[in-house]
Amino acid sequence: MAKLRNLSITTPLLFALPLRSTWAVNPVDINKPVMAGDWEGAGSLKFSRGFVMVKNDANFLYLMLDVVADTGNDPGTNDYFWLTFDNNRDRAITSGVDVNYGLYPGQANKLGRQKYLGPGQWTGLLADPSNSAVVQEFGASPNGDVSHRIWKFRLELSEINVALSWPLSTPYTYFGFRVKSSSPGFTTDFPTDFYKDFTKLRQLVLSRKPSIPSGSLGPLIGSVGLIPAGKNSDGQFIINQTTGRATTASGYYHFVENAAFGGTLNLIGNRTKLQQLWAAGNRKYKVEIAAPGGSFTKLISNWSNYRWTGSTYTLDSFAPNALGYYQMANPGIDYSIDDLLIQFPTAGLLPGLYSVKVTFYVGTSYTELDSQILKLYIDNHVPSTIIESVKHGSNEVSACAIETIGAAPDGLNFRITANDPEGNLRGVSFYATYGTGLSTSIYSEGYTPAKGNWAGFTNKLVPASGNWRPPQSCAYSFVLSVSARTTNGYSWIGYNNTHRNLTLLLG
């Protein structure tokens, strides 16, 4: 039986009201004009020169610096921004961790990213790939009819170290920014000297309240995180009730194909049904779990959920009574995770097809009123990764060796294993890193539905024919990385890798 011990959570220290993001039902297109409607309903915060507006989904933070005071349409005059995030949320500058965004010199719509080294000190611009972006606009906005400068951002949540799946806290970060205008002339920091001192950075609380179409929700268990527990438009269960694996539409918040479940899971109720139960006074319920081939036993778990008071979040704790029955939280209260029936860890469960049952009762009685069973394939094992051999011709090349590679077609070949016995492999990448931030792909393979429950391969020859040749003489690290086709309902979980180091000289 999965069980979560009580944990103490300290509410983040708040120096001012937090900026609360709202859920982006559809991804915000930062290339479209602000007035096209994508920013409608966004969270908003006023500062001395304008407004900050924010939305988010499961992958991105959409943030706008609406600088209504910058009415000079003067491109190329060194107007710029800085946008800083406290990535470990400790209200202190941490070298190599906290991030600052800015413009590439002379490129108005190219987003640069650097790490803090100390107060007012940064690394150079980072060269690693990013899906974050910025677009500059000059025009009207919901906050000002006179044309003015607007900076629109799409920021990867992973870059600012935020995940909607945090089980013990509402997702949040701390941020600060600078906007610089040449005409009219001003430089405004929010808060003052934020880039030297993080203690007064403003808290930004992200939303994890997607609007899942009601027709996709399960009748009582509405969803597992963002994964609906009902049927899709073709009448098929989104979580297959034969296999316990989930498939969502390609344009959905969290796109998964034949995915197992793992990590800490949130079972979220069908809001309409919970409101009806609450109004009728039927608020007592029980949660049970059955292991593969086993019978149902009570699922006992303690968890916490942040409640919005109107000015801040306060932590409420939830647990069953001594007999293992839960009381529904008021669906009319604004929680960080609305309609949460139970949050429970699965790390201690062996892989397999589990059944989870939720039963509601009439009033305080033991008369069953309504129930639902949801089958979930749970798998917290990560795929294995083995670099079985590295050969130069017929000779094995040992780790840390210095090997001379002759003229083409001379080179190396490898045998690798990427294996998941439960059939939940998502992707394989075998590559070499060398030099300063350089890498080259040797082999990669991803999941397609045609693979079914993909277990991967063992002792695979790479390349399939011929040899792999290094691009230059250098020290190389050969990395085999795999990901599992396992979700916690919000994002993919389960990664593994191994590596072997060699020095290769081109003769």
Image (cartoon, rainbow, N blue to C red):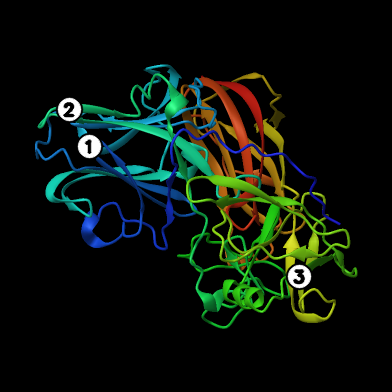
Q: How many marks?
A: 3
Mark 3 Cα within 10 Å, few/some/many (few <14, many 20+)? Answer: many
**Callout 1, which amino acid?**
Arg
Which image quarter: residue 328? bottom right
Crowd tier of the residue under label 1, counting other residues whose Cα lies within 10 Å: few below 14, some 14–19, many 20 or above: some
The residue identified by callout 1 is 49
Looking at numbered disc 3 in the image, what kind of residue is underneath it? Lys
The amino acid on which the numbered mark 2 sits, given as a three-letter code, is Phe
Residue 131 in view of the camera: no
Above or below residue 292? Residue 398 is: above
Q: CA distance from mark 2 to mark 1?
A: 9 Å
Q: Position of residue 105 (x, y in %)?
A: 23, 27
Label 1 vs label 3, nearer the camera: 3
Callout 2–callout 1 Cβ contact below 8 Å: yes
Residue 372 on image: x %, y %: 73, 76
How packed mark 2 is, by other alpha carbons closer than 10 Å (few <14, some 14-19, many 20 or more), is some
Residue 284, numbered circle: 3
Q: Would you say 89 lies left or right of 460 here? A: left
Q: Are marks 2 and 3 in contact (CB under 8 Å)?
A: no
* Residue position marked by numbered label 2 in the rendering: 186
- Does dot 1 land on a helix, a strand or a loop? loop
Let me know if residue 371 appears in the view.
yes
Q: Nearer the viewer, residue 474 or 327?
A: 327
Which of pointers 2 and 3 lies earlier in the amino acid sequence?
Answer: 2
Query: Residue 332 versus residue 460: which sits nearer the camera?
Result: 332
